[in-house]
Image (cartoon, rainbow, N blue to C red):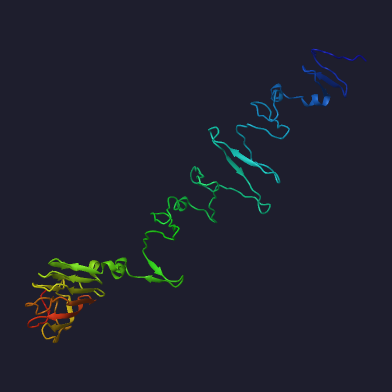
Amino acid sequence: MKLWGDFTNLLVGKKLLMKKGAVLTVTSAAGVESNIDLAELAALDGIAATDLAKIDGITNGTVTASKAAVVDANKDIGDFRNLDAVNFDAGASGTAGSVDVFPATASKGKFTISCTDQTGDTAVTMNANAMGQATTVNIPDPGAAAGYVVMTTAALALAEADVLQGATAGTQVASKAVIADANVNTGVSKVTQLHIGASGSETQVTATGAEINRACDVSTRIVNATSSTLTVTEADHDGKTIVLDLAAGIAVTLPAASAGLKFRFVVKTTFTGAASIKSVAGADIMIGHALMGNDTNDSVVDWQSLAASTNDTIDLFGTANSTGGIAGQVVTIEGLAANLWYVEIRGDAAGTEASPFSNTVA
């Protein structure tokens, strides 16, 4: 049988019949021979020329537009533009994998997703919960080479996490978490209730802030009165010592009587003119005692203001200090109830001593 060979071009008009097992030997321009058997030729049957073109001119390991993608000898391939997958594995069990995400600007770093060894053969899943809007989740700069994400056992709302943003250790900021500084100080505290004591056995502090200040602020316990009139108030004078220091005389007006109020008056400078302490209204009655000493012979007299009286005034001058008003006199006034003051007076009087109690307020 005659063998055909060394064709430069072969044009077949209808059919080219080859026996079973026949092989076509093709020599490339570079002189490399390749054998093509009939099974390989049969596999090409029905493949369009456009499809065959997809494997023509490919480079292993490099993605080329409109060409088949073939990995290189290391099973690597690069430069896909967009790649969709139902499931994507980076690496395999025993082989570390990672995903690198690059920004739009060259040489500006990248975002790498990787995984360290787990305690057991378990999976860590990141899941986006149902959201009512398009959401961008940003990872802030931790300011250090390593930073960690806060973990919670339940969903944490943005508003809840936001209480940490802008919080300052040692300084309380509105609507932010309170964080103690290195000295365990938290700065100014504003509370509506205060409970003190061991956990589970606390006692509520029922006094108001103003009441606590009046009782505990030593720097404000002495109030100097040097004007001709003084209107006493709970806020400014309760629980304090009021020093009466104007020789010409001072007219003092008390607030409305109520249980718990307490004022202490001390005459520092002997009065040479009219001086008095009066209730703000005639309904506020004074009961108590005035223990007065004679300024010449040290005799003592006790002037009473009884419950049945309608006394509402303490006269601190009378006639030339006959009712008191001499330096060193002390007058203590305490509210027992609405419309009722309890009074204690100790001091000297001059001339013909007289009761300092009277009813002068309408």
Quadrant location of the C terminus in the rendered image: bottom left
> Residue 149, image x and y in percent?
54, 50
> Residue 253, image x and y in percent?
16, 70
336 left or right, relative to 29? left
Residue 281: quadrant of the picture: bottom left
17 left or right, relative to 59? right
Residue at 53% in and 52% down: 150
Can residue 362 be seen?
no
Residue at 21% in and 76% down: 333
Q: In this picture, is 242 found above or below 70? A: below
Residue at 84% in and 13% down: 6
> Residue 155, image x and y in percent?
52, 53
> Residue 349, image x and y in percent?
11, 80
Q: In this picture, is 295 found above or below 107? A: below
Residue 28: quadrant of the picture: top right
299 left or right, relative to 76? left
Quadrant location of the N terminus in the rendered image: top right
